[in-house]
Image (tube, helix red, strand yellow):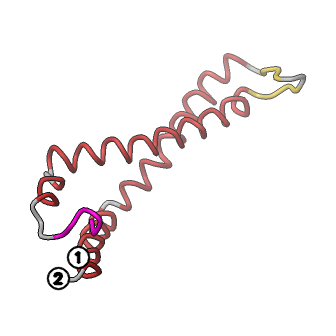
Amino acid sequence: MTALGAIRCVWLRHFDVYRKSLAYALVTTFAEPLLYLFSFGFGLGSLVGTVKLLGIELTYRQFIFAGIVGQTLLFQGFFEAAYGSFVRMYYQRIFQAIAVTPITLSEV
């Protein structure tokens, strides 16, 4: 098997996995921040009122929106790397399968 053929096989396997889990990934990526925005923004926001930040008066929803976006970006990046690696290592044993394949590490 050539190096490009080996790389193609690994790439196609990962492409199939991502294609099957695309809907789940998109739903969770957008549902969680919307849940936080509705629960904290509308629920807690009705109790807080306005927030004064650097001389600008903001509603509580406007104030926490940037934090929710930042938290979502950090969490999604961490979750994709950490949980994906854990599942591939522990449950799917992908790393063990890659270790015994007849391709080199650079081709993976």
Kindly identify the residue that appears in the image at 60 percent across and 38 percent down.
70
Kindly identify the residue that appears in the image at 85 percent across and 25 percent down.
57
Circle 2 crowding by C-alpha within 10 Å: few under 14, some 14–19, many from 20: few
Kindly identify the residue that appears in the image at 63 percent across and 30 percent down.
41
The residue to which callout 1 is attached is 6
Residue 24 vs residue 73, the one in the foreground:
73
N-term-proximal mark, 2 vs 1: 2
The disc at residue 61 is none
Compared with 43, 103 (above or below) is below
Circle 1 crowding by C-alpha within 10 Å: few under 14, some 14–19, many from 20: some
Q: Residue 12 at what x, y percent from top left?
A: 27, 74
Majority SS type along the magenta span: loop
32 left or right of 48 in image = left
Farthest residue toward the top? 47
Is residue 97 on the magenta stretch?
Answer: no
The amino acid type of the residue labelled 2 equals Met
Residue 17 vs residue 97, the one in the foreground:
97
The amino acid type of the residue labelled 1 equals Ala
33 left or right of 67 in image = left
Magenta residues span: 103-108
Residue 21 vs residue 1, the one in the foreground:
1
Q: Residue 1 at what x, y percent from top left?
A: 17, 82
Tally the marks.
2
Q: Residue 107 at what x, y percent from top left?
A: 27, 69
**Helix, strand or loop under label 1:** helix
Q: Residue 74 at what x, y percent from top left?
A: 51, 39
Kindly identify the residue that appears in the image at 19 percent across and 47 percent down.
89
**Which of the 4 image quadrants contains residue 47?**
top right
The disc at residue 1 is 2
Farthest residue toward the right? 55
In the rendered structure, are the residues bearing label 2 and label 1 in contact, judged by CB atoms less than 8 Å apart? yes
